[in-house]
Image: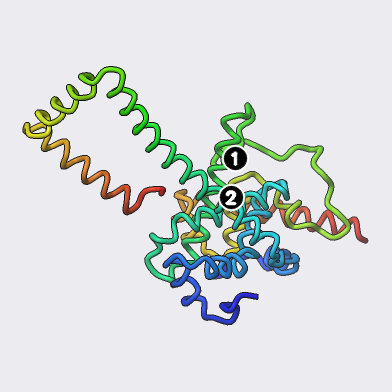
């Protein structure tokens, strides 16, 4: 049994198809370039932010960043820390494989 | 003209998946007509249809590494296009008090919409259908999908899809009749 109506099919068949243009291809290419650039800017910006923030913290109060580092070390060797690290590693691997990079 | 212009589609898709920019351009060149037509039928606005068409290819570029086989490309591309359109419809719905939710059939076209031109304009005729009926009709007639495939693709019961298509066809045929009566 056919599912399509012949008059509606004819309506679609008669309709003028949009032809391919280089303008459209160029517009897509420009959007992708902008997206790539934005991703790079965000990645570099975030990295710079953390580096600068760390440097400033060390300069202004050397003991502040050192204490969290020691605490982090203690946490990582605990049972909760190991479980969290395993979960984080799994999430990170998943994001690198399937994430929107 | 790209050196890939005469290459087999599976080769072009394979190269694009591996990150070849000129293969991706060739893919855009080959598939834009289908995607832009689909968007023109689904959207009421030509400029929006072009914008959504571009968004579809940006999504394709982002997701290409996850494409499992070249043979699945067409269905995969169509799914991305439908999702881009659905997202746009839902986004508009958030900012609009009038419901244009694709699954809400309570919305009916307004009386002041542009009249059909000298020759029946399919995009214009489709714009007079509810969003769901339009999507179902376009997938059935433009994409050649069966009602069961449409139901699976847009996650609606088969009976609902059949009912939207029946009502959409009825309305399109009514418009055709009106047009033919005007011509006589």
Front residue (pair A52, A83): A52
Give the image's coloring scheme: rainbow
Residue at image coords 52%, 64%: B146
Mark 2 — on which chain does it sit?
B
Q: Do labels 2 and 1 share a chain?
A: yes
Q: In this rendering, does residue B22 appear at all? A: yes
Q: Where is residue B35 in the image (x, y as percent from the top left)?
A: 61, 60
Could you tell me which residue is drawn at 40 percent across and 63 percent down? B67
Q: Position of residue A96 (x, y in %)?
A: 32, 50
Residue at the far front in the pictured view: A59
> Measured from the top left, where is residue B115 in percent x and y?
84, 47
Where does the image place residue B131, in percent across and percent down from the top left?
A: 62, 45
- Of pointers 2 and 1, the one earlier in the residue sequence: 1
Q: Can residue B137 be seen in this view?
A: no
Kindly state the secondary structure of the residue where label 1 is placed: loop
- A15 horizontally vs B134: left or right: right
Question: Quick check: marks 2 and 1 in contact, CB under 8 Å?
Answer: yes
Local packing at callout 1 (Cα closer than 10 Å; few below 14, some 14-19, many 20+) is some
Q: Is mark 2 on a helix, strand or loop?
A: helix
Q: Quadrant of residue A74?
A: top left
Residue under the image location 45 percent in, 49 percent down = B155
Image check: A20 left or right of A67?
right
Q: Relative to A30, is B175 on the left or the right? A: right
Q: In this view, does B28 lie above or below B115?
A: below
In the picture of the structure, the residue carrying the numbered disc 1 is B105
Q: Residue B27 lies in what quarter of the image?
A: bottom right
Q: Name the residue under label 2.
A: B164
Which mark is drawn over residue B147?
none
Whole-angstrom CA distance, mark 2 to mark 1, is 9 Å
| Relative horizontal placement of residue B18, taking residue B55 as reference (left or right) | left
């Amino acid at each position: 049994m056919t599912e399509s109506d012949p008059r509606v099919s004819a309506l679609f068949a008669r309709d003028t198809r949009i032809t391919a243009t280089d303008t459209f291809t160029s517009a897509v290419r420009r959007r992708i370039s902008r997206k790539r650039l934005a991703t790079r800017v965000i990645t570099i910006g975030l990295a710079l932010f953390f580096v600068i923030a760390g440097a400033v913290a060390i300069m202004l109060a050397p003991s502040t960043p050192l204490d969290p580092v020691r605490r982090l070390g203690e946490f990582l060797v605990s049972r909760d820390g190991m479980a969290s690290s395993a979960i984080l590693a799994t999430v990170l691997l998943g994001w690198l494989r399937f994430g929107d990079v | 003209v790209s050196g890939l212009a005469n290459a087999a589609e599976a080769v072009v898709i394979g190269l694009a998946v591996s990150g070849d920019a000129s293969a991706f351009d060739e893919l855009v060149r080959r598939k834009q007509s289908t995607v832009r037509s689909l968007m023109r039928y689904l959207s009421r606005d030509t400029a929006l249809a072009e914008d959504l068409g571009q968004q579809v290819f940006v999504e394709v570029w982002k997701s290409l590494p996850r494409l499992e086989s070249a043979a699945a490309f067409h269905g995969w591309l169509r799914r991305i296009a439908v999702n881009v359109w659905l997202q746009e419809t839902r986004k508009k719905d958030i900012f609009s008090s009038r419901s244009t939710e694709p699954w809400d059939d309570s919305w009916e076209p307004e009386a002041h919409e542009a009249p059909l031109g000298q020759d029946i304009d399919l995009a214009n005729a489709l714009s007079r259908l509810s969003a769901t009926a339009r999507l179902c009709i376009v997938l059935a007639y433009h994409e050649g999908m069966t009602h069961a495939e449409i139901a699976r693709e847009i996650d609606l019961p088969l009976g609902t899809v059949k009912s939207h298509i029946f009502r959409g066809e009825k309305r399109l045929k009514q418009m055709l009749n009106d047009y033919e009566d005007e011509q006589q």
